[in-house]
Image (cartoon, rainbow, N blue to C red):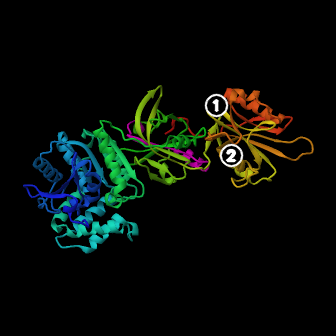
Amino acid sequence: MADAPASAWARQGTAPDGTGFIRAGSGAPVLFIHGVGMNAAIWQPQIERMAGNWDVIAIDMLGHGQSPLPPPGPELTDYADQALRLLDHLGLETVSVVGHSMGALVAQELALRAPQRISRIVSLNAVFRRPPDLAHAVRERAAALNRRDDAAGAAQTIARWFGDPVPSTLAAAAKKTALALNEVDPEGYARTYRLFARADGDQAERLQTLVMPALFMTGSEDRNSSPAMSAAMARLAPQGRCIVLAGERHMMAVAAPDRTTRHIVDFLEAAEQGDGTVTSGFDSGDFRRALGSFLTGVTIVTTIGPEGEPRGFTANSFTSVSLDPPLVLVCIAHKALGHPVFATSKSFAINILNEDQKAASGIFASKAADKFASVAWRPGQTGSPLLDGSVAAFDCDMERLVDAGDHSILIGRVRHFEHNSSQPLGYCRGAYIAPGLSQEALAATQPGTDVGAILENGGRVLFVETADGFELPRGRGLGSAGDGKSLRGLLAAKAIEAQLGFLFAVWDDAGNSARTHVYYRGTFDVPASSDRGVRLVDIDAIGNLKIADPAVRSMLARYVRECTQDAFGVYVGNEMEGEVRPLGKAPMSAPSNTGDHR
C-alpha cells in the first residue's frame, strides 16, 4: 500500500502462526488493527508520527496481508486470539490498542476477552447496532461476495469512503486505499466481511463491562460508522468518551492523519501521565466571549440516547462555572421525561438560541414526539447534536451530576465550543427579548439620531474623557466601523470590541430640536491600553463624575440604581419627563426554566 517499502519506515516480521506484522519505534507499546480489505501498512501515517515516542505494532488481520486465512465461519474471538498470540510472541504483557472499523470490533473483543492485557482502547469508525436499512445494505454486499476479484465492488467501496467523485485533496489517500483493496486475498476478504456484516451488535451487552478508558472516534460524514454509533458505545463503556471529527469520512486515519493521530496521542498520553482527561488548549479570552453570548438566555440541551437517538429539552438555567477548567452547568427537573437519559449520559451539548429560533424553543419545551424533525443539526465532537444557527454551542463531557432538591445539576467540562456574532434570543421577566430587532430598526433611521451605549465589564463602565468631563461612547447613528462619526466608528477608532444588548433609554429633545437619543446597555472587552481617552469607572463611582449633559446624568443615575436592584427597564420620553417601562409581559407559552415539561 505504501509509496515506500515498509522496511524504509518500519520492521516487518512474521509470528510463528504466520501472522504478519510491522513494528517501529520504542516506548509504551500500541497495537494497531486495520479494517476489512486493508493491511498493516495502512497505518504508515500513524507509525511515522508516533514511532519517536511509542513502540508501534501493526498487525495483518487474518485473511489480510501476510497472515493466514481465518476459518470458514469466523468469529471475533478468532481475530482477538490472533492478536493475543502476537503479543505473546513479542513478549508484551500490556498494550494500548487502536482499531479501525472491523479492527475496532476486534480491538473491543480483545479488551473484553483479556482486560488485563489492554491499558487503553481507541475505536476508530466503529459500527454499532446498524439501523435496519444500513444493516440490510451491508448484508446484501456480504452475500454477493465470491472468491473472484471484484473491481466494481472496490470502486464502490472507495466512493463510499471518500466520495463520488473523490475530491482532489483526497486523491492520494484514495489511491493508497484502493491499492490495499486490490492486494487483499478475495477469500480472506469475503470471510472477514461476512463476519463484519453481522457482528455490529455482538458486544452490545458487554461494553458496559469494559474496564479500561475507551475512546470512540469517527467522522461527521461517516454514514456507515456514524457519530450516533460512537456516542452510543461511549455511553455504554464505563470510561468511554466520544470524539467526532467534523467533515471527515470513514478513512480519516489515512485522509486526515495529522488530525486523527493527534487525538489518538492525546488520549494515550493522558494515560501515561496518570490523568483521565485530555487538555482543552482553549484560549480563555475567546471562551469568555463565547460564554458572553448568553443573554439571560434560552438554550436547547441535547444528547444521544441509549438507542442512538437524539434527545433534547429547552432550558434557561444555564451558567458558566469555571474558565480553568472550562466548566458550565444546566439544570433539569427530576420529573422531566428526559431526566433519566440526561442523568446517565456521558456527554451533552448546550445550544444558545438566536432570536429567530423561538419556534424551536417552543417545540423542545413541548411533548412533541420527534422534536429534531423541525431543526437542522449535526453531531458535535462528543456526538451530541449541535443545532444549526445557534449563537453559541458548548459540547461537553459530563463532569458531575449533582442532585439539588427536585432538580439535577448537569456540570459539563467543555470539550469544544463555537460562537458567532448573531443576536441571541433572550428571556427576561416572562418575555422573549430580541435586542437585534431594535438595532436593525435603528440602523434604518435618520443618520442624525444620537446613538450611545452604557458598556460594562466586571462592574466597570466605559467612558470617554474629554476637555469638558466624561461622556459615554456615542455617535451619529449606529453606523459602521468605517464611519468615524457613528457609534460603531467611534468604538473601532478606540479599538473597543463591544456587544450591544438591551435598549435602555430613548428620548427626544424638548422644544424645537428634532434630535432623538437612543442608548443601549452592552458589554465590552477591556482594551489593551487607555491612551485613546478611554476610562473605566466603577459603577458606584459614576455619581462623582463630571457629566455635562443633565439627561445623560439622570439616565446614569437610574442605571446605577437598577444595577443595585438587578431590575432593568426602558426609559421612553424626552429629556425632561417620561416613564420607565418594563421589558415585557409574560407570553402565553414560554421556555421552562429547567426542562420541567420534557
Task: Look at the picture and state if 227 lies above or below 588.
Answer: below
Residue 142 place in picture, x, y as percent: 23, 64
Task: Look at the picture and state if 264 lies above or below 404.
Answer: below
Query: Is residue 145 toward the left or the right of residue 403 in the image?
Result: left
**Residue at 30% in and 63% down:** 137
Residue 589 place in picture, x, y as percent: 61, 41
Question: Is disc 2 surrounded by few (<14), some (14 to 19) or many (20+) residues within 10 Å?
Answer: some
In depth, the one of 508 and 138 nearer the eye is: 508
Amino acid type of disc 2?
Lys
In depth, the one of 482 and 529 nearer the eye is: 529
- Please state which of the two labelled residues, at mark 2 or mark 1, is closer to the viewer: 2
Question: Is disc 1 surrounded by few (<14), some (14 to 19) or many (20+) residues within 10 Å?
Answer: few
Amino acid type of disc 1?
Gly
Which label was assigned to residue 459?
1
Whether residue 410 can be seen here: yes
Query: Is residue 137 toward the left or the right of residue 450 in the image?
Result: left
Residue 503 place in picture, x, y as percent: 71, 41
Q: Which residues are magenta?
A: 342-365
